[in-house]
Amino acid sequence: MNIAYTRVSSNQHNKDRQFTELKNYNIEKWFNDKLSAEEVRPQLNAMMDFIRCGDTVYVWDFSCLARSTEELLIIGEQLESKEINLICINENLDTSTATGKLMFTMIKAIKEFQRATLLEHQKEGIAIAKAKGKYKGRKKINYPLNWEEIYGKYKDRELTGTSAMELLKLKRNTFYKLVDEYKRTK
């Protein structure tokens, strides 16, 4: 089935340009959101629930489908996992073709490269700050006052990890870090 998704950013805009371009593709089902980018897009969610293996989703351009490269990749991967083809008219991208798949893979690679580069720069910055004595890392979290009691119940399987975290008012990572540290000292 050929499915189209259109989005315009507010009530002041209209979808005529998108509709005019997309109607040339034998669209059988339309999903249209008319709202700002920050709002939840009910028609996009409805389309994602509606689509089935072998369908093709048509959009005028990436910005209609996603608000960021990261979101585009998430939606693209969801479509790919359902074996749905994506065609972006403005970008001339069709994921049912080898070239379209390559282009989408390149977008993913660029996003991963940007993330890796950001992490490298962050590590370099931390190393420089440590060398200057300006970076001390995170503050050490002390054991809560009721740690021994709650930990004992957790260890004896009277409490689940989640229950223990709630009682101790600790986040998951902090709780398990303290558990590991406590085991090493006992």
Image (spheres, grey):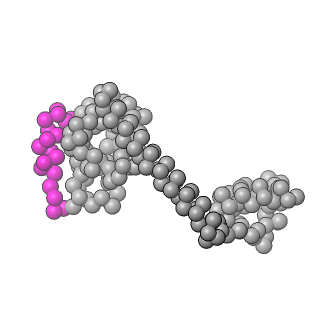
For the C terminus, the image quarter is: bottom right
Q: Give the range drawn in magenta.
A: 11-28
Q: For residue 173, what is the image quadrant?
A: bottom right
Q: Foreground residue, 48 or 115?
A: 115
Q: In this view, does 145 lie above or below 44?
A: below
Residue 124, horizontal then vertical, whole percent: 55, 57
Residue 54, horizontal then vertical, whole percent: 33, 28
Specify whether 96 is left or right of 70: left
Q: In this view, does 111 lie above or below 168?
A: above
Q: Which residue lies furthest to the right in this view?
A: 186
Q: Foreground residue, 128 or 20?
A: 128
- At x 39% / y 44%, what residue is drawn? 110
Specify whether 9 is left or right of 176: left
- At x 65% / y 58%, what residue is drawn? 172
Q: In this view, does 135 lie above or below 94?
A: below
For the N terminus, the image quarter is: top left
Q: Can residue 25 be seen in this view?
A: yes
- At x 79% / y 67%, what residue is drawn? 147
Residue 42 falls inside the magenta stretch:
no
Residue 171, horizontal then vertical, whole percent: 64, 62
Q: For residue 78, what is the image quadrant?
A: top left
Q: Residue furthest top?
A: 98
Specify whether 154 is left or right of 99: right
Q: Can residue 45 be seen in this view?
A: no
Q: Foreground residue, 109 or 58?
A: 109
Q: How many labels does the image show?
A: 0
- At x 34% / y 32%, what residue is drawn? 101
Residue 150, horizontal then vertical, whole percent: 79, 64
Residue 15 falls inside the magenta stretch:
yes
